[in-house]
Amino acid sequence: MKLLFQLTFLIYIFVTLAYLVYFVNQNKRVRTLARYGMLVAAVGHLLYTMIRYLEAGHTPITSLHETISFSALAVTWGYLSFRWRYQVKNFGVFVSPLITTLMIVAAFAPQGTTRELTPELQSIWLPIHAGISLLAYGFLALAFCGGVMYLLQEREIKNKRFGLFYSRLPSLEALDRLNRHGLSAGFPLMTLGIITGMIWTKQGSGAYWQWDPKETLSLITWLVYAAIIHQRFTLGWRRRRAAIMVILGFGIALVTLYFASY
């Protein structure tokens, strides 16, 4: 099982390097290798998660390694599903480094063997709540990557330096739509994750909310994204403002994800 994780990790690194090479030289064969490599890595990663599930007898999202690994898996499949519906030029160049970074964190976190769940974690709400929440992070990560791409492209246009990024990145309008789609998918899933977490807490402790650090961080993250959604869809904030906000929001989400893993 450890060997499968390491092999998947190496494929992600290869995919990232291949996308970066393609970004520079625009060799379509390299892009094809990167795309197929991403699909192979996604399948291998899913297989690794399933094997870990079978060994543990529960969803493998109860340690830092498992949580970060599952997050990388969610970003990967979120990207693949998004790419199946929309064509965003060179999107993989920015998504693959994020996935690889998450895999680096997971690789250096203690892997060990799958552990037996404590009584409070032995609930059907564990896979429901955690799975939905991590899937939300996957789509919000796509919005984050779109925000980074938007700022880079806008800088090229504003400075009238039509160089490497300008010719290889989508239009600002396309990147703004990417931002909107990522938020539209990620925020409802995050909200559903909060609700299922409350139900789980009620089942275990008799109260819907206990204000422990994990719950507090999750609420702060949700409020930040709720403000982003409000400003984006009600007040009409778009383009640069929206890009900056999703970048900041995802930074807060990562902090929440890291500390919640403990």
Image (cartoon, rainbow, N blue to C red):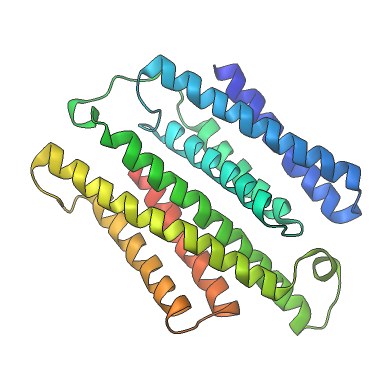
**Number of disc labels:** 0
Q: Does residue 38 appear anywhere in the picture?
A: yes
Q: Position of residue 116 (x, y in %)?
A: 29, 19
Tell whether 120 sits left or right of 37.
Answer: left
- When asked about the image quadrant of residue 24, the answer is bottom right
What residue is drawn where x is 14% and y is 39%?
203
Placement of the C terminus among the 4 image quadrants: top left
Q: Please state the horizontal and vertical placement of residue 14, each as a whole percent of the image.
A: 75, 36
Where is 87 relative to 119, above or below? below
Residue plotted at (45% across, 52% down): 254
Q: Residue 143: percent from the left, percent from the top?
A: 56, 61
| Placement of 144 over or under 39, stated as above or below | below
For the point 46% across and 21% down, the residue is 52
Dividing the picture into quarters, in which one does residue 176 lie? bottom right
Up-down: is 242 above or below 128? below
Q: Position of residue 205 (x, y in %)?
A: 10, 40
In the image, 89: left or right of 106? right
- With 119 as the anchor, is 187 left or right in this view? right
